[in-house]
Image (cartoon, rainbow, N blue to C red):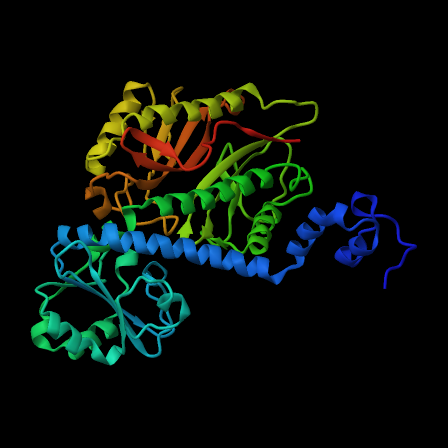
Amino acid sequence: MINKSQPTGLLGRGLESNPVGSLMVRGDLMTRWPILLCLISLWSPALHAQEARRRWEMERQIRLDKFEQILPEAMRRHGIDMWIVAVKENHEEPLWNDLGRGYVSGLGYYVFTDRGGERIERAALGPSGYLIEQSGAYDLFQPASTLAEFVRAQNPKRIGVNMSDEIGPADGLSHTMHAHLVETLGTALADRLVSAERLVADFRSRRVATEIVAFGEASGLAVQLAERALSNEVVTPGKTTLEDVAWWLQDRLLERGLGSEFDMPSVYITGREGIAATSTARIIQPGDVVMIDWGVQLMNFGTDVKRVAYVLKENETTAPKSIQTAFDRAISVRDVLKRAIKPGRRADETMKAMDAALSAAGFGVIEFNRPNNDAATDVAYGFHPVGNTGHDIGPSLTTWQPIQRTFDLHLQHMFAFEFFAYTPIAEWGGTKLRIPIEDDAILMEHGVQFMHSANYRLLLIK
C-alpha cells in the first residue's frame, strides 16, 4: 500500500519505502522505464550473482592463459617433468586459488605433466566441484587414490613439490603431507622429488594480460578509497581518530565484497620523532602529516599503495612551504629510480644501479629510517613484488627477500614502486620528515609503467 501523504523523494516523484512500486503507479510508466530498470537492478539478487560470476570468469581466464602460456616454459626452464601440488581438507595450500580451487575431501592433488609438445597435461586427482570442473582448466579428474598409479605410468625423472626455505607461496607442502607423499609414491619415485620453488616463482610472477587488467582494477580501488579516506568526507580534525579512518576503509571493503591485504590498514602520523601512532585512538589534529599504507584483495590479487595528506591549520589554504617541498622532493626521486630499472638484469645488480643513480642526483642512499644529519634528501627503497599478494614472489629490489634478489627482472614483472624520502624541515630544527611514496607498477619493454595514476600531489584536509 502506498501512503500518498508522504513527501516526494527521488526526482520529486515519491520514492518511498517501495521505490519500484511507487514509480509503477505514478504517471506514465514508459517515460520512467529507464529509471525503473535501474532501480530493479539495485534490488535484484541476480546483480550480485553476476558480479560473483564476473570475478570467477576473470580468474578462470587468467588460469587458462597461465596454464597454456606460462606453465610450460616455467617447468622446462627448471627441468621439472611433473609438478605435484598436494592439498588437504581444511588446510589451504597457498596456490589453491591460482590452481582452480575445488572441494577436497581428505587429500587431493593437482598434477601437471610435461609430455612434450606445446602444452602441459593437467590432472585433478581429488579436487572436485563446480568451480574447478566448469573452469576448463583440467584435462581429467580422477580420485586421489589413483596418484601412485598415475605417476608410475608417466615415469617422470624430476618431480617438483612445493618446498621452499624463503618463498612462502612455494612452501605449501607440510611435513606430514611430504611423508604421506613419500609413502604413497614409494621409494623409487620419492627419490625424484625436488623443490618447485623456482617453478612456482616463475609461474606466479610472469603475468598474462588478464592478470594485468584484474590487478589494475584492484589497485585503482585501493587508491580511490585511500584518497577518499584522507579527505573531509571521513576526517574532521580534532574529532576523527586514526582508527576511525582505518575502520571506515574496512567498511568500504565489506560493502564491495573485497578483502584487506594487510589486515588493519595502517593509518599513521609522522612528525619530528618519526611515526607517532598507527591506527590507534590518536586524534587527527591540524598540522599533522597523515599517511595511509594498505592493500585491497580482489580476484586473487593483493595491492600495496600509500597516500599522504597534510591537515591544514586555521587560516591555512596550502601546506607550509617546507612540507610541500619535502613532498615535491620525494616525487622527484621517482624519475631517478625509474631510469635505473631495465628488464633482463638481475635484481641485485639493478639495486646497485639504483643506488648509483640516486647518488649522482644528489640524494643520500640510506638504510631504512636512518637518515643522515645533513641538508640533503635521503632515500631508502623497497621495491618488492606485488600480484597475488601485497608482498609476492618474483624478482625483488629489497633487502629482506635475499633469494629473490638473485632473480632476473623480466617483462610484465609487477612490483611496488615503494620508497621513503627524508627531507629536513627548518621549523623542526633540521629534523627530517619522512615522506613515503608507493604505487603499483609493472616493468614493460621500454621501462617502468604504473598500474594506476601514480601519486603526484599532497592531499589536503581542511
Is residue 370 placed above or below 28 in the rendered structure? above
The N terminus is located in which quarter? bottom right
Left or right, 227 with respect to 112, comes to right
Quarter of the figure with residue 111: bottom left
Q: Tell which residue pokes out farthest to the bottom in this image.
A: 145
Residue 71: percent from the left, percent from the top?
A: 22, 54
Observer-nearest residue: 245 or 314? 245
Residue 300: percent from the left, percent from the top?
A: 40, 55
The residue at the point 25 percent across, 73 percent down is: 177
Residue 121: percent from the left, percent from the top?
A: 20, 63
Residue 412 seen anywhere in this rendered image of the structure: yes
Is residue 462 placed above or below 137 in the rendered structure? above
Quarter of the figure with residue 443: top left
Q: Tell which residue pokes out farthest to the right in this image.
A: 5
The residue at the point 24 percent across, 71 percent down is: 175
Left or right, 134 with respect to 190, comes to right
